[in-house]
Image (cartoon, grey):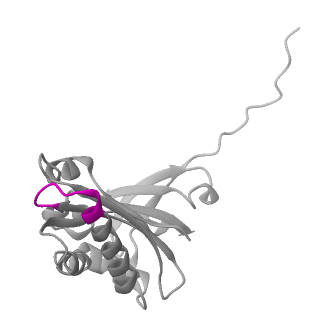
Amino acid sequence: MARKTTGVKKKKQKSWYTIVSPKVFGEKTVSETPSIDSKNVVGRKINVTLSDLTGDFKHFHTVVTLKVKEVKDLKAYTEYNGQSLISDKIARMVSRWKSRIDAVEDVDTKDGHKLRVKSIVITRKRVNTTIKSEIRKKVFEETRNYCKGKDLESIINDIFSNKMQRHIFQSAKSIYPLQSVEIRKTEVLK
């Protein structure tokens, strides 16, 4: 025997939440996301190209990850969670007869964040393991020194304006001639 239904249950409607970028990027509207409850929106991650945030097309190869930290009146406010280069950019940098050196360093910022910085160094010619390890040590040292005493916002601005990459390039080129230095990826750990 079939069960009797006593009434129709109303489904809760989803609301659309506007996602707003952090103050570093001018608190612009990035996108929208649907959700039944505002609690479900907190913690979501959104990937946006840096060129969409800044309006400068030369940054199209950088993808910024934003994380929703709070929701107020159908607006979801985000914070910076990391950035990465697209794989095509890295593939264009690395070519035959050149060496690729990766360096990963965890740094503490002045405002209490822990940031993982992944750098990539390309030399003009292929080098042996000894030179690679010397360059890697220099990159570790310069990354630590550069980030010491700075807050997360100033480090982000320096990465996106290539100041940090130029600083590392100038100090590491004394070991061996370099083609380029890029910050391949950053992650906010805490």
Q: Is residue 115 above or below residue 4?
A: below
Residue 84 lies in quadrant: bottom left
> Which of the two residues, 73 or 49, is positioned nearer the viewer here?
49
Give residue 147's position: percent from left, percent from top: 38, 83
Give residue 32's position: percent from left, percent from top: 41, 55
For the question of whether residue 26 can be seen, the reply is no
Residue projecting furthest to the right: 1
Residue 149 lies in quadrant: bottom left
Give residue 119's position: percent from left, percent from top: 31, 65
Rendered-image quadrant of the C terminus: bottom right
Is-magenta flag for residue 125? yes
Q: Is residue 135 left or right of residue 69?
A: left
For the question of whether residue 190 can be seen, the reply is yes
Rendered-image quadrant of the N terminus: top right
- Please give the range of residues in magenta: 123-132
Residue projecting furthest to the bottom: 149
